[in-house]
Amino acid sequence: MEQNTERIWNLVARKFSGDATAEELAELELLLLQSPQENYSMEILHDLWNSKPELNRQYSENKYKALVLRMQQAGIDEGRFKNKDGLIFDDNYIKAKSSKKWFLWIASFIMIGLAVFFLLSDNEPTGNKKQPAIATKNEVNTKYGSKTTLVLPDGSKVWLNAGSKMTYDKDYGINIREVNLTGEAYFDVTRDPKKPFIIHTSKINIRVLGTAFNVRCYPDEKNTETSLVRGSLEVSLRDREEKFILKPNEKLTVSNEDLKPEMINIAGTKTPAQPKSIIELGHLSVMPQDNSIIETSWINNKLVFRSETFEEVAHKMEKWYAVNLIFKNEKLRSKRFTGVFENETIGQALDALELTTAFMYRINRDSIFIY
């Protein structure tokens, strides 16, 4: 590498001085192709060479002699230059154009500096070089108003609802099958007893071998829900030691808001206990019209809610329609609705809700104000 660098700059000097032969120019071109960093330096130097700076030779000599004179006055120089020897103070010379022979000295310093810089960069120990960050995780995101499906390397299928994110390691499936989820997803996991499938959310961890289930864990909602359709799974909470084994058609609901810590008596002193999440074990909800499961109806492009508050319905509609619902009357938040929407627009859905509860709405682009 050092030999190539030295040879390149020798040929560059000959090229700029006009002494390079055709063979040397061809050799220089080949070496520059093999060393892109020197080629970049060559381009910079070429631009400097053709820029024709305004400093002339006599002015540069004046500056050099003035520097030597100051060194002499400080007792550093041995006196090769006499005081004001040959110094020229005519401003016309300062503005005169420089000759290329003098500029070659400047170019030489630049070439040496660039060569040293790139040489040191290339010879830097590998351990000291900053390596580009390599992504170790795959990430799948869905925007509000959209959904997506994917198949993991082990054949497991995932349906990702609006406003959700799932990440998993690049080496997923080699030793363990593990994903992180924010939002909502329906999983149909390929069975593999040797490699359990694990889901991490902000409140719970879910461990399965092979099953189908739904997880809803939006950070802006009150609860995290795990709904089992078939198979079995184990749910453990991050802030509790209990583990729950779900059976088909069961749903575990965990509050995203911790209980206020209770006061416990320790050695005669009342101390707040560790806060714990509210847990409820129930069953899946079924629509009487067609026996469809409400918790998983979204994968069939149906927005379903049953006796839910307007606030809860608003959270679902915001993600479903990619809008922002703003309540101008706080009392409306607690009103309850039941409904099924499939192909309706946001306006049509709100018109249908108006039939059962008195309210008005105004749409302003992506914002909807509820009165």
Image: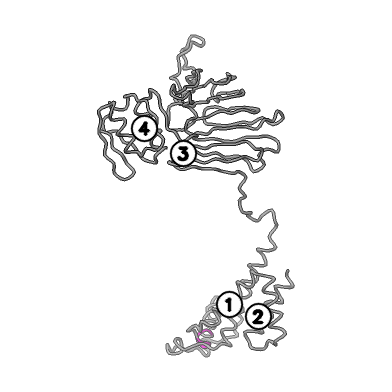
Amino acid type at image mark 2: Val
Between 262 and 318, the residue placed more toward the observer is 318
> From the viewer's perspective, is residue 307 above or below residue 172?
above
Image position, residue 364 (x, y; %): 29, 44
Q: CA distance from mark 1 to mark 2?
A: 10 Å
- Range shown magenta: 56-60
Q: Which residue is mark 2?
A: 12
The kind of residue on which mark 1 rests is Leu
Check disc 3 and give the amino acid type.
Answer: Ala
Disc number lying in front (4 or 2)? 4
> Crowding near pointer 3: few (<14 within 10 Å), some, many (20+)?
many
Q: Residues within 10 Å of mark 1 (few under 14, many from 20)?
A: some
Q: Dot 4 corresponds to which residue?
A: 314
Which residue in the structure is indicated by mark 1?
45
Instruction: Name the residue beneath numbered marker 3.
Output: 162
Amino acid type of disc 4? Ala
Contact flag, marks 3 and 1 (Cβ < 8 Å): no
Q: Earlier in the sequence, mark 4 or mark 3?
A: 3
| Secondary structure state at the residue bearing disc 2 | helix
Assign a secondary structure to mark 4. Answer: helix
Q: Secondary structure at mark 3?
A: loop
Q: Secondary structure at mark 1?
A: helix
